[in-house]
Amino acid sequence: MPLNARQQAHWAAAQRLLQGLGHTDPEAFAFAKPKRGPKRAPYITIERIFFEILDLVRAELAAQQVHLGHTVLEFAVFNSMRDGVDDPVPHIVQSVNAQGLNEPGFVLYPLFGVGLLHDPKSELLTRSSRLELIDGTAGVAISSAVADHQALTAFLDRAVAGLGVVGTLPHNAIAHFAALRGVTDWLLKNPLLVVRIRSVSMGARENQRAYTSAIGHRATLLGLISAFTRARSLSRLLAGSTRAMGPPATFDVRHYFVFESAGDPSKPLREDRVPMGPRPAALLRLTDLDLDIDPMAWNHPRIQRRIGSLTDALLDLEDLQAAVAGKRVSARHKDNLSRKLSTSLHWARRSFASFADPREAVVAMAVAFEALLSDGYSNGVTKMIVERARTCLRAQRASVRLADDVNALFDWRGAIVHKGDTPAVTDLRPARQAYAHAFTEVVKRTMATAPTTTLVIADLFSSPPSN
């Protein structure tokens, strides 16, 4: 992204001022900045264009789904100013790519409530049994709880290979993390989630928003795909799920782990133990999923088609989010669509949480539909949502039944919210299947349509707003 004439003039002036000040790094610059007086003026002039260029670089990298922490960006922009670079944005982006800092690494995160189902034809699970699933297209890998750091290392080695992560796993760091008893116990007690990311940071939680977005999206994907696999009988489920084996998962999670690529397949990944921060419960909810995943069913042709459609929709959404962050979206209101789709996914994921009260799952699933298929509250909005769901489901063999399931979901939601009743909800799987189809269809329409009004969902369905 080339600078405009104003930016070029301010950038050149800032370079001259910085050369006169003689500072060689941003820390020295910040430390020397006067708190008041006329000598403060050149620092303010430099800072104005400095942060403007920093935002442009961040946006350009975000469009490539590459996330550089604030500290890394500050040094990159400062060095370009100090070294007399004429066009800093493409220079920095090219430098990042040339160093391989845009190559993928991964986040390692705990799962709660998730079980993996074994092959019922094989022997029953034992406490040393381990199951895993690696999907390179979706950029996600999961494993049941591992017995020791050797098993943890072996799983992560397979995840690195399967997800296309560039770099080698630092085995000594894994052994060190696993040995921190009382600090990282979840590594050997909880099911594990690995999510591919492209990130470089120098400070704790610098890129946490990017991490949590990717983690939340993959957790939702796991839940929605599980809705398409047949539930086994209770006795089979208890015998075949890893949830019934081994020690209980721990909620005492103080850190998660980030492994960033150094840009060279032969170099070890840079590891970082990231504190959960002041609101750990909010982060733990990202992967609180009351479900069982069957790795065998994941490879069934019918499920593979569902996985492909859902994964494509999720990746399209993330491309749209990157385009919005990179300010490359020329179509009006697509940023609003991006936010609505992300909000809808959030509530769909919350419907899988291990709520003490199952009524909360019904309400969360209904909110997911509302965010996906409506522009706001109005008279007749529930009927409109059901009709739009019916439109999204037309290509499905069981479209009539699925649309009826959406209608039943809103009947349950109305009974809970407005009447204070406790309806006998037997199974949310059909409503979740309908949601998965509707989400896929809405994303397709989003990528093919340029909304022209603030009623972005109505634009997608080419229907007038309801009265």
Image: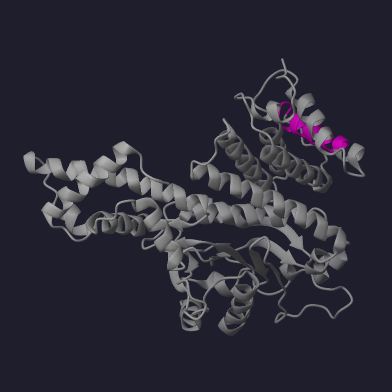
The percent position of residue 285, horizontal first and vertical second, equals: 58, 52
For the C terminus, the image quarter is top right
Q: Which residue is drawn at 76% across and 63% down?
A: 293
Image quarter of residue 49: top left
Residue 411 among magenta residues? yes
Q: Which residue is drawn at 58% across and 33% down?
A: 331
Left or right? Give the position of 215 relative to 440. left
Give the residues drawn in magenta, as a range.
Answer: 403-419
Image quarter of residue 203: bottom left
Image colouring: one colour
Residue 321 visible in the shown view = yes
Left or right? Give the position of 142 relative to 257. right
- Above or below residue 241? Residue 420 is above
Residue 283 among magenta residues? no
Q: Is the magenta stretch mostly helix, strand or loop?
A: helix
The percent position of residue 21, horizontal first and vertical second, equals: 12, 53
